[in-house]
Image (cartoon, rainbow, N blue to C red):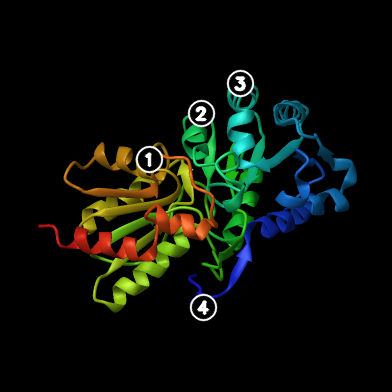
Amino acid sequence: MLLENDHIVRSTREAYGEVLIELGKEKENLFVLDADLSESTKTCAFAQAFPNRFFNMGVAEQNMMGTAAGLALSGKIPVASTFAVFASMRSSEQVRTSIAYPKLNVKIVVTHSGLSVGTAGATHFCEEDLAIMRSIPNMVVIAPADALETKLAVRAAVEYWGPVYIRLGRGDSPVIYRELEDYRIGRAITVLEGGDVTIVATGVMVARAVQAAKELKASGLSARVIDMHTLKPLDKEILLKAAAETKGIITIEEHNIIGGLGSAVAEAVSEEKTNVLIKRLGIPDVFGDVAPAEALWDKYGMSVNNICQLAWSLSERK
């Protein structure tokens, strides 16, 4: 399952474009919509292969979501793409009322999430989308860790009946998996076993969690790594097992510390167990600075070194 070579990287956006072509050949009722960003979201490949099933809606994201709802009502499977900030905020009312409320079969796949647009600055960052989307009834929320998981997530979303939000980044991501035999929505993956502490990560942060766990192992600490690719529905069973078997839980996400993975894990665990310490790593409650994404991750406490320090502090608790 786990790839041993840490230096292989691949774009989740490219993987998304590839799986759309595969699905387009398999499903004649699959339609793709984009908001004038198809070169960036990589839906342009589908547009070339299936021009009659692709719609460039222009810079009109609200209209794109309404059109997707109409396609779903006519028996199609619409996949709508744009940047995360535009899908989750500019068109949030249409997503909530036109798609989620009637539980229509619409898939929303976004790119350029979190801090991945780096030098574009706070107006194009999206650090709030997981909180927004997981608070909308009927919405499934997924953040794949790498290219293979992206393909499997998109396939699973297309097979699932109802609205799904899939969050992708911008740049190349380290390849985590060489294979995944049993990917399921709502079923988290234990990437590495460990008995001292648990690191729960989602999206691009899974790679940093794995790297931290390997460094911790080399220095004598056993860290379990869980890839929580689905934030809603959340895999509570795997979390409660980790809470019972390790000394504490660290969550890490490229999202505001409020309302995302850390909040979801804390909510789920605290309802069942009150003696487990959970530490959340993510973007503090600030608008991000202008810098490359990796530099911002480090600045806001999501460095491998900081994960390791936090793991050691949890392991030493009585």
For the point 80% across and 40% down, which residue is it?
Answer: 29
Q: Position of residue 300 (x, y in %)?
A: 40, 52
Mark 3–mark 2 distance (CA, rounded to whole Å): 10 Å
Q: Give whichever of discs 3 and 1 has the lower sequence position.
A: 3
Q: Find residue 264 and name its label.
A: 1
Query: Would you say residue 162 is visible in this rendering?
Result: no
> Marks 1 and 3: in contact by CB < 8 Å?
no
Q: Which amino acid does the dot numbered 3 rest on? A: Thr
Q: 120 or 234: which is nearer to us?
A: 120
Mark 2–mark 1 distance (CA, rounded to whole Å): 14 Å
Which residue is disc 3 drawn over?
97
Q: Give whichever of discs 2 and 1 has the lower sequence position.
A: 2
Q: Which amino acid does the dot numbered 4 rest on? A: Asn
Mark 1–mark 4 distance (CA, rounded to whole Å): 31 Å
Mark 3–mark 4 distance (CA, rounded to whole Å): 45 Å
SS class of the residue under badge 1?
helix
Of the 4 image quadrants, the one containing the C terminus is: bottom left
Q: Which amino acid does the dot numbered 2 rest on? A: Ile
Instruction: Please state if 19 lies on the left or on the right of 8 as rendered.
Output: right
SS class of the residue under badge 2?
loop
The correct choice, above or below, for 162 with respect to 188 in the image is above
For the point 48% across and 77% down, which residue is it?
Answer: 4
For the point 28% across and 53% down, which residue is it?
Answer: 249
Which residue is disc 2 drawn over?
136
Q: Give whichever of discs 3 and 4 has the lower sequence position.
A: 4
Q: Find residue 5 and name its label.
A: 4
Mark 4–mark 2 distance (CA, rounded to whole Å): 38 Å
- Residue 245's quadrant in the figure? bottom left
Q: 45 or 99: which is nearer to us?
A: 45
